[in-house]
Amino acid sequence: MPGDNVTAGPAAADPSVAEMAAASLAPDAESVLEPSRHRTFIKSIVGGAATVEELVGRKVVVGGWVKTGREQGKGTFAFLELNDGSCLANLQVIVDAGVFPLSQLVATGTCVLVEGVLKKPPEGTKQKVELKVEQVLEVGPVDPSKYPLPKTRLTLEFLRDFVHLRARTNTISAVARIRDELAYATHTFFRQNGFRYVHTPIITTSDCEGAGEMFQVTTLFSDAEKVEKELKQNPPPSESEIEAAKLLVKEKGEAVAHLKSLKASKEEISAFVSELTKAKESLAKLEERFMMKPGIPQKDGRIDYARDFFGRQAFLTVSGQLQVETYACALGNVYTFGPTFRAEHSHTSRHLAEFWMVEPEIAFANLEDDMNYAENYVKFLCQWLLDHCREDMEFMVKQFDKTAMDRLKLVSSTPFVRISYTKAVQLLENVTDKKFENKVEWGMDLASEHERYLTEVIFKKPVIVYNYPKGIKAFYMKLNDDKKTVAAMDVLVPKVGELIGGSQREERLEVLVDRIQEAGLPLEPYEWYLDLRRHGSVKHSGFGLGFERMILFATGIDNIRDVIPFPRYPGRADL
Amino acid sequence: MPGDNVTAGPAAADPSVAEMAAASLAPDAESVLEPSRHRTFIKSIVGGAATVEELVGRKVVVGGWVKTGREQGKGTFAFLELNDGSCLANLQVIVDAGVFPLSQLVATGTCVLVEGVLKKPPEGTKQKVELKVEQVLEVGPVDPSKYPLPKTRLTLEFLRDFVHLRARTNTISAVARIRDELAYATHTFFRQNGFRYVHTPIITTSDCEGAGEMFQVTTLFSDAEKVEKELKQNPPPSESEIEAAKLLVKEKGEAVAHLKSLKASKEEISAFVSELTKAKESLAKLEERFMMKPGIPQKDGRIDYARDFFGRQAFLTVSGQLQVETYACALGNVYTFGPTFRAEHSHTSRHLAEFWMVEPEIAFANLEDDMNYAENYVKFLCQWLLDHCREDMEFMVKQFDKTAMDRLKLVSSTPFVRISYTKAVQLLENVTDKKFENKVEWGMDLASEHERYLTEVIFKKPVIVYNYPKGIKAFYMKLNDDKKTVAAMDVLVPKVGELIGGSQREERLEVLVDRIQEAGLPLEPYEWYLDLRRHGSVKHSGFGLGFERMILFATGIDNIRDVIPFPRYPGRADL
């Protein structure tokens, strides 16, 4: 049962410890601690494997927030629907008026920690068990007139103004549990397949694709503020002050030289040398302050990034791929899972400025291996949710998307269709029952409408499209022998379209150099990336899965801002 | 065996798919893919549970990088020590000259994919098995005169100039595996204890402690660059151009009004309205361009952050704690595990600008619960390494720290000492055999020298110090009844000193407000944090573990820059 691991009592003295130390363990006024109290998760009561018979009569401590509360029997007792976030279901709790003032407990959002005994509820009620409270241990009250999340159903849009409280709602807490399960499933899948988790950097001086708007990371503003403050408190020296200080250094220097020429005693000389040193230090400080300029440091009319924290321009990563390749070219199978960033002014329901990506990278793997891993990974995630998130998924089906569960079942059990880009374009060109907004022709990038038509209408299952025209794909993708296409692949799924994008990477040095130059990019920033091809180059492949997209796909929720705890988008970064 | 999960062949057509779709699955020129090839990890050969008898005679494909290679028998065959990063040990590989030109295989760093048969090595050799190569499938050559990592032993400092290649060395790859294991152990521990993983944001508009230098995240520089470029290509309009455009709008407007007064036909009017609209749009564009100013946008003599991406100043997080508290106050037991940032100009071996933190947050938990979780977590990590990383840990013992393994055993099996801060100060005041650089007196913060003396000399085991003076701790820590101390705790371990810092959080609204104001902080940015105490407040606690510190502690490596894949520090952010 969760929580059971924490059973360590106060530490006992080890007899081998020195006497002094041992003595310290005797309790003193400062060391008296409130004892630990074992709390039982509601999930282990209402959602656990325990039978009613095993539960009834058990004394438990339970904590949570009141979903709904009502006084009954003319105020002689109250029913509380208590939720602690461990699962969607609530525990029904009964408190007698003699135990605690009921009016302080029944407001929605009230936090309570109670001790009581599990009882069998009256026949005909739907609860498995209910809790008869013997003692109310703690209360965090709510003033219903001020509580921002009343019991009425609230829209997800409304809740976005309360990111600090919205996890108390059924939807956002269910999303949080699904998100947690998908994260754990991700680590489990890759571990089972011999992958190592590599933490690629957030702050980067590389640009993954030479495209993509990036956020800049800087201390220039705060440095400038410090300088400004400093200059205000303590104005910079005048030129004459500097001259005076220079003169002093000169005088002290001459004095030392004079003493030396007189062969004065060591003590005498060193006293003067010390004065000279002081004069020099004071001059240096004045000169430094004299050079202080308010504002962002400039050089040759441009911002002087040499004076920024990293000595050059630095950005937030748009992908960990290039960096994780360095580890694939040493450890074989690796993956990164972390936040990535785009400074795009997109206000759509599918874009965030900060979002999480899963990016495996596999040595000795070609495009087919890549597709196999991608397919197996997505299937694994879907099956995991079916196995571990039934209750929350049923809630999603009821509230957001009737087909959500069926979609998981379909994807987890059906082989993905695999077609070349060229074939996909042919299929789309032959479509007569729908007019696409973007014209279908070889060479175009597939738009979301095309992707969804392929997976939702033509095949009605996940589709992997591979071998895209090189003109629409990144420089690092392996050029195929036809010289027209690259070994790229996208996994398309119903509801969201592209879920995964991947490719075999170009492992041939000369071809990669050409591709970088063709893309109009400078070689210098990619020298380290080219080094991987210069020294023991290896065929390798990888892909990226947008983690929030996967949650949208799984839950059927429409807006990406509702499936990440703290959404960041233009104009908005709460908390 | 790792890698075995990937067995999906090309997808088979589902009979229910429309005919058109089915036809597409017939192979075409574009859809021909290089087939997937099953690679066996070297770990499963040399480090697996398989006996020599089970292995001998097996045909396998193995890929990796040559650690050392040498031609033997007057060039008739070569020995290669092959490593694929799946484990520390190499596989001995034998290639006959007739199979492949040996000179292309033996250089250190060469990448090879080979197929062969596992054989029993001659009596007296230390290998369990060796691989007799039948076919060399792929080679990524190395020019030894240019390879930056020759076979000689290289210092960790030297390797920091090659972060893109250093994972090929024994030390850095062993660190990578240990890091991966600790990450997986972290997720496992918290899952077993009913915690949910919450992704707290990297970009934040909150400052966790009102201290700590933060990196700023901005698009103002790139926006300014765009404006500058735009103005250069296309100079802003003059005032007279604006006046002319205004006049045009006026004329068109009058024309429309005139037509309307004449009761002209709809067509006629709408033609003129459309001209008016165009004139207005053109004026708006001119005015917008007229307002364009080069440089960073200013307002009232200060930088105008309202025009930055998020409409306000945004930073990189220094801790996910405050944000994860919002989820603890809804889901109960949660944790965050991700990168955090400090823009401090520290050049020490213990500081990074970007580092990873594990931060659990526990509802209904007091300080003793917090200590219990912290102690159990650290013990769990140590035991995990003993169970899963024997080979890499033995390497660390041999190369870096003879006591590394003993330290893990000690910590995993010994109850941690728990003493109050007051007692700790008393103990330190009584120390006679050592003179501390920082004077010991009640109210001081414990320096590293004090922490290490407590854990290494006095107790010789992990120590938890709790109830610190409120003056040296953050505002959010719970004020004890003595009003002098707060319910904070630090876990001190041999070798690194402070490994964990945690506290019970102040859940009382009024006390928290007082503490924020005492700290000289404004209330407004913390209103959301105060809301957690206003509405259903809950007793809760949490702690933070510096992930790189844990790796230093485990491995005995001295410099933090060597235990993170891509270290960031002042002046340095490679890749």
Image (cartoon, coloured by chain):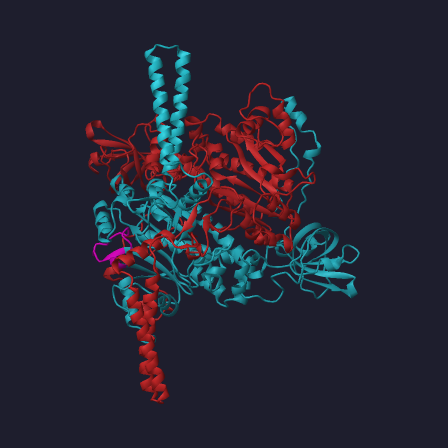
Chain colours: A red, B cyan
Front-lying residue, A228 or B309: A228
Image quadrant assignment for residue A144: top left
Front-lying residue, B531 or B569: B569
Q: Can residue B200 be seen in this view?
A: no
User: Could you tell me residue B203's position as x and y percent?
Assistant: 39, 45
Residue displayed at 26% across by 39% down: B535
Decide whether residue B470 is among the magenta residues.
Answer: yes
User: Could you tell me residue B440's position as x and y percent?
Assistant: 28, 69
Q: In this view, does B564 lie to the left or right of A164?
A: right
* Above or below: residue B288 compared with residue B543: above
Decide whether residue B87 is among the magenta residues.
Answer: no
User: Could you tell me residue B101's position as x and y percent?
Assistant: 76, 57
* Above or below: residue A240 compared with residue B283: below
The span shown in magenta is B469-486
Front-lying residue, A370 or A9: A370
User: Could you tell me residue A346's position as x and y percent?
Assistant: 44, 35
